[in-house]
Image: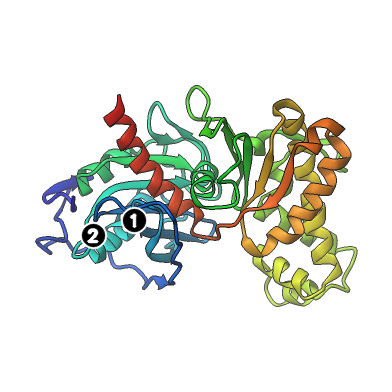
Amino acid sequence: MGLKGGARRGGTKIDSPLNRRYSPPRVKPMTQTNAPRQSSQAITHKSALLGVDLGSNHIRVGTVDPAGQVLAFRREPYSEEARKKPRALADQILSVSWQMAEDQAATAPVSAVGVAFPGLVNQATHRAVELAQLPSLAEIDLRREIMQAFGVPTHFENNANAAAFAEMTMGATRDAGDWLYLHIGANVSAGLVLNGRLHRGKSGLAGAIGNMNVYTDHPGGLMPLQAMASAESVVRRTRERLQKDRTSSLSKLGAMGGFTYDDIITQAHAGDDLAKMMLNRTGAYIAMAIADVINLLNLAMVAIGGAPAARQFLTASIADGVRERAFTAAISDCQVVAAELEVEASVIGAALLAADEIADCGRA
């Protein structure tokens, strides 16, 4: 099914790529990468599923076939307006999605749309109720706007659940029944899978592990995990540490205007002791929360997602931390591993979840 001609968004008429009358807002060119993923699952029909993932610095958008193989993948930086204004953010999501669907229409028309958000999504209202580092979309019925513009079923999900669904379909956890996916980025969140199915809780708000308190050396002792382990928090803690230790290569970057989470990861791979220590400490904070979850649920596996280049540091330190904190019988059942899928994981998962929702409706 292609985009729905003549749909309206915020009072503005949106035409489908089939009649070529709609001109989306002018945006910067998107960076395209080829990221094919193979799957043994048979492709049953020629259609495409569109997935969107709101990252820390980019909107990632892609199309996948019904087996999860990536057909196209792009990312676009947020506009300055989109970082500040909810309406501008919603418009940019619609624009980049439309562009991808237009490119796809001739070969495999889009049959469903899935969007992954860096925060909580209320599945009863189909709205993102909390977004990390982005303006709130709680007052905008973006799902309705997308459905009107595209004329296809649309599913909203948090980014950890979306990545978890992709990982259980074609990644490291294909054979795990009870496990947890941990996303570390703009937000810290978890996708919980029990008996092979995602568990979202009553309203879809399960997995808010970033809101769990962990012990720190800050005044008061307890802090939300998000405040210690998100990408922004790691940068903040590193800046604070540099006030005491100026031998790190990150000091030069700081003097030149600052550094990012990706810079810390890059310097850790280059052997910078401070950068490695900050990532290892981040893993130790995460382990405090993960160990309690393992004790509670007797999980078989914890898959560490987020920035692929950070996973080797975080996975090792989280594994060490949970071995110290979880009780012996529970941790002997559980593996802590790096997730296999990379930056496209939430795009794949959001798209597949949209198709899964259609299938569930058909079975009902």
| SS state under label 1 | loop
Q: Nearer the viewer, residue 176 or 240?
A: 176
Q: Which mark is residue 65?
A: 1
Location of residue 190 (image quadrant): top right
Q: Is residue 204 visible?
A: yes
Q: Amino acid under label 1?
A: Asp
Relative to 272, residue 62 above or below = above
Q: How is the image coloured?
A: rainbow
Q: In the rendered picture of this protein, how many numbered marks are placed on residues?
A: 2
The answer to whether residue 248 is left or right of residue 314 is right
Say which label, 2 or 1, has the lower sequence index.
1
Question: Dot 2: few (<14), some (14–19), or many (≥20) neighbours within 10 Å?
Answer: many
| SS state under label 2 | loop
Residue 20 drawn at (x, y percent): 12, 64
Do the numbered discs 2 and 1 sit on residues whose CB atoms are within 8 Å?
yes
The answer to whether residue 278 is left or right of residue 76 is right
Question: Dot 1: few (<14), some (14–19), or many (≥20) neighbours within 10 Å?
Answer: many
Relative to 201, residue 334 above or below = below
Residue on which the image places disc 2: 108
The answer to whether residue 164 is left or right of residue 44 is right
Q: Is residue 84 visible?
A: no
Residue 334 drawn at (x, y percent): 74, 39
Quadrant including the C terminus: top left
Location of residue 274 (image quadrant): bottom right
Residue 165 drawn at (x, y percent): 49, 44
Q: Amino acid under label 2?
A: Ala
